[in-house]
Amino acid sequence: GSLRAGQLSADICIEGDDYFFTGLFNTGGPIESFIRWNGRFTSIGRFVGRVPRSTAYLVMEENLRKGNSKIVLAAHGTTTVHGRKRTSKIMDLPPGDDLMSALFLSGGCRREMVVHDGEDPYEIDLIDIKAGDAVKQGADHFAGDADRCKYRFTYHTGRVRKIDVWHAQVSGHEFPVRIRIRVPIFPDAVLRLRNPSLTDSDNQ
């Protein structure tokens, strides 16, 4: 079985090799042991081949339970963190690309990825690929064949999670249409991406 993991809405603008990716993310339930987030993100970057390479990443996060918020801006080799209940800090930008671009804009399965959330680095390694996996998710969500990428996600603390990502063609571009995160003890947490709002200057 699986549990509802939250909601994600995203808007993507692609002009040549450049992209602008922004969205809202609200998590809930067991997935919060993997990522706990209610807020907005924006990523700007370029596609190198089929791989997104972010140049700037902004996160505005709200924790309703703790009553605090945080703004993270990662660009030009540094990360600046502003918090409602703490002083601002500046640190070196972690290696790799931002997590949201890497997970949601990568065209197909990638052998390995180094990613970050603006503050901490993570490693993602490909375990297996299953091509032509049938996906059925209900109204307003993708249904059809997709390539399933099985990943191992390693935190900077050494903790490990397994993630399955299904990639399929949407509006002429390849996007993840389903993400499953395996959570210990609980049923798997599943994110179903609604068909994104996509603006592509090449198709206009």
Image (spheres, rainbow, N blue to C red):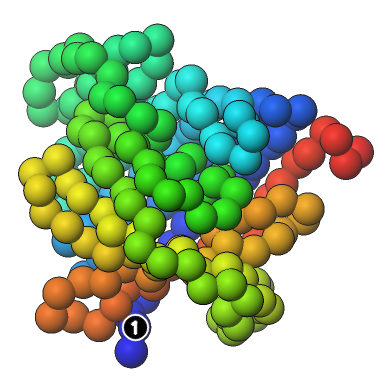
Give me the residue at 33% from left, 52% from top.
Answer: 125
Give me the residue at 32% from left, 49% from top.
Answer: 124
Quadrant in the picture for the C terminus = top right
User: Is 77 situated left or right of 103 in this image?
Assistant: left
User: Is 168 situated left or right of 87 in this image?
Assistant: right
Query: As shown in the figure, which amino acid type bears the numbered disc 1?
Result: Ser
Q: Is residue 26 visible?
A: no
Quadrant in the picture for the N terminus = bottom left
User: Could you say where residue 127 lies in the image, as x and y percent from the top left?
Assistant: 35, 63
Give me the residue at 21% from left, 72% from top.
Answer: 183
Q: Quadrant of residue 82?
A: top left
Farthest residue toward the bottom?
A: 1
Asked whether 103 or 79 is in front, the reply is: 103
Q: Name above or below for residue 72 compared with residue 4.
A: above
User: Could you say where residue 49 lies in the image, as x and y percent from the top left?
Assistant: 64, 34
Give me the residue at 85% from left, 35% from top.
Answer: 202
Q: Is residue 4 visible?
A: yes
Asked whether 47 or 60 is in front, the reply is: 47
Q: Name above or below for residue 70 compared with residue 137.
A: above
Asked whether 134 or 61 is in front, the reply is: 134
SS category of the residue bearing label 1: strand
User: Could you say where residue 55 lies in the image, as x and y percent from the top left?
Assistant: 48, 20
**Residue wearing tag 1:** 2
Q: Name above or below for residue 11 compared with residue 187.
A: above
User: Could you say where residue 90 lies in the image, as x and y percent from the top left?
Assistant: 20, 12
User: Is 47 situated left or right of 161 in this image?
Assistant: right
Q: Residues within 10 Å of mark 1 (few under 14, many from 20)?
A: some
User: Is 75 situated left or right of 22 in this image?
Assistant: left
Q: Name above or below for residue 134 compared with residue 152.
A: below
Farthest residue toward the right?
A: 204
